Amino acid sequence: MTPDPESTPAISSSGSYWVLQTREMGYAFGLNPAGALVNAYWGQRLPRLEDYPELLSLPARSSFDHPLNQIPEEYPTVGGPKYTEPALQAIFGGGERDLALVFQRTEVSGEELIVTLRDQHYGLWVELHYRVWAEANLIERWVEVTNSDQEAVRLERIFSATLQLPPGRQYALTYLEGRWFDEFEQQRKPLEVGNLVLESKRITTGHDGSPWFALDAAESGDAASETEGGVWFGTLEWSGNWKLVAERTRFDRSAVHLGLNDWDFAWSLAVGETFRTPAVFFGFTNGGFGQMSRDLHDFVRGHLLPHGRQARPVLYNSWEATYFEVNEGGQMRLAELAAEMGVELFVVDDGWFAGRDRDNAGLGDWWPDPVKFPGGLGKLIAYVQTLGMEFGIWIEPEMVNPDSQLYRAHPDWTLHFPHRERSLMRDQLILNLARVDVQNHLIEVLDRLLSANPIRFIKWDMNRNVSEAGWPDYPGEPREVWVRYVQGLYRVWGELRARHPQVVWQTCSGGGGRVDFGTLRLADQAWVSDNTYAPARLQIQEGYSLVFPAVTMESWVTDRGAKQVPLEFRFHASMTGVLGVGGDLNEWSEEQRREATQHIRTYKSIRDIVHWGDLYRLRSPTQYPYSAVQYVSKDKSEGVVLAFRTHQGRTRDAPLLFLQGLEPEALYTVEGVTDGAGQQVVRSGAAWRVVGLRLELSDFRSALRRITRVNTLRGDGVGA
Ligand code: DGJ
């Protein structure tokens, strides 16, 4: 029986047992006879509340294995006879380093359940918060710790959640890793006994990986595929140092612990203060990795992005055309060519501000370079608007070059240690955004820029990683800087967003170094990678699509690989997200610009489906020289397939593409698919799924085909 989401509440309780349910997921925990808060279940939603399993009560196996070390604790702490991973670790004023949390009460408020625990002796209160997003198929979890004792408590680790997996199975962890120019690479590893640790220590989310995970059964027969099978997944809403520990114990217990990185972290919690962790969003689906992505995409689009369903303009970005050689005349010429092709937003990248002739000067001085823009930005912006486009600009607010007015005035404003040399990377240092004076300065300077100019789009970049993360003047616990920095970043960005709500932001950190649920509350778009070579991009974009929706994925058509990869292929690769153009238009022939105009027109006619529909990854570019993605509108009336062949495989036949997500009983045509008599082939959605579609392509060729619903089988009795 399929459970009816309407008939059972999102949060149910029976005595000291709680069940949280979403569209497809059930999650249960409670107090065991010994009074410990223990997880009972996470997985497929079960038909009846009575179906959820009772809490495990385990006997001691020996004097070496206390039952407390074996139970799947809901929020494990350091304390007592336990040797597995904790989520919370603290030191009390007197030096006591053992936490013994005792259940106090629960409270339900709307879709939120709050479980309150307190230390057996000290006035340390721990609240576990669960917010159920039933329709979105996700649960949001975070923790709030309050000190009502006599002395400060030092938090040494405070994860947002421990997520216990059902026993009886071995799991494989799918995750994303990468490096600059090669982000979002998919990995899958079986969980062996021990810990698999993923993390960032870079003060940003990092190119190394994403604070996201997916688990499925490790045995090949039970493993999830793109289209079916159980997937447990989650992600952290945080844009700084994070840590994920995937743990498998010797007692058939698997868990994922996720939250702020405890490396070089500490937080001194003063009396009366509360510390709130970032949230983890987690879910379960039986619909394989594809459904997992669609659940995450819907949530990002429906609940995170600041501008919701607003259309995303086709943009031109000048970076790869001009690099630092920006000037008024040059940008105007590019703008003219871009506007002729149908571009809607013209973005000036790095190189426009005071003293910025190379990457070794200017960062921090956020006003137009007087030589490049003698009268300010006004003339260029007005021209761009006359051409019918909006105007956008690049900034890198967290950075400063030693060769800048800002650094000369405030050398103490960067992260540094007094007796250590400040490591330069790209000739720049990081401003200490944990400092309120630095935050206020950035708000003021950027507010001035946005108030003085009709800027509609900002690319917020960050081009180096942290080093010497010191804050010499800070009187408190120095290791708080990691968290306070990100809180400062959120404050600056949030304040600017509030003052200039019409501005759309892009998150960028030398490509995809800072894309996460935290930045996507501030920025509608992300720059996924500096690698704009389309075949590589297909792989990077596929990894990105596991977590993030196409409407956030800015992708430019550039000149990289132009000799080998046709313009059409490059456009098609970028049309799978938010289309941008980044090539040097001065070098494009008239014929190329005419072709580009046609592609932009086509894109505009499908972007609604790509941005707001459902994504189906039909064939992965990481495994085949031939890959394809499909998007289907939410009402299933239309769709689009984009297929790509990179190089000659061993077989000359194109693989069959089994279309998905169509209404099984409705009839559809696929653009360009005709029978022997030249008639459009009409098939039911069910038939396209099993009969498939073959699009022959030669090397480095691509295809874009529209799918159209023509009528329904039911009612008119017409077959295909
Ligand atoms: C890194 C970004 O990823 C590029 O797109 C470009 O904006 C440069 N920074 C500019 O310095």
Image: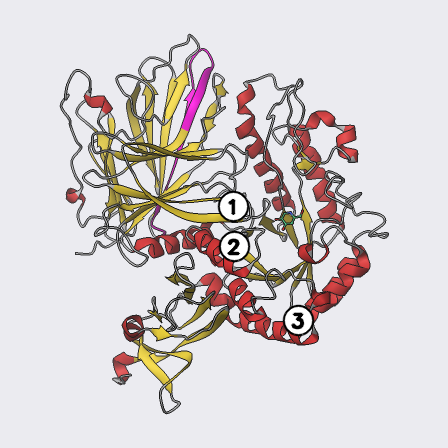
Q: Main secondary structure of the magenta part?
A: strand
Give the Cα separation between the discs numbered 2 and 1: 10 Å
Does the numbered disc 3 mark a residue whose Cβ is under 8 Å from ligand 1? no
Where residue 282 is drawn, which disc sits there?
A: none
Name the quarter where the N terminus is drawn. Answer: bottom left
Does the numbered disc 1 mark a residue whose Cβ is under 8 Å from ligand 1? no
Q: Which residue is mark 3?
A: 341
x, y percent for residue 169: 21, 41
Q: Which residue is mark 1?
A: 515
Does the numbered disc 2 mark a residue whose Cβ is under 8 Å from ligand 1? no
Where residue 552 is drawn, which disc sits there?
A: 2
Identity of the amino acid at label 2? Thr
Residue span colored magenta: 136-158
Contact, mark 2 vs mark 1 (Cβ under 8 Å):
yes
Q: Secondary structure at mark 1?
A: loop
- Report the residue at 41% width, 49% height from top: 186
459 over 53 or under it: above or below: below
x, y percent for residue 183: 50, 48
Res 551 visible: no
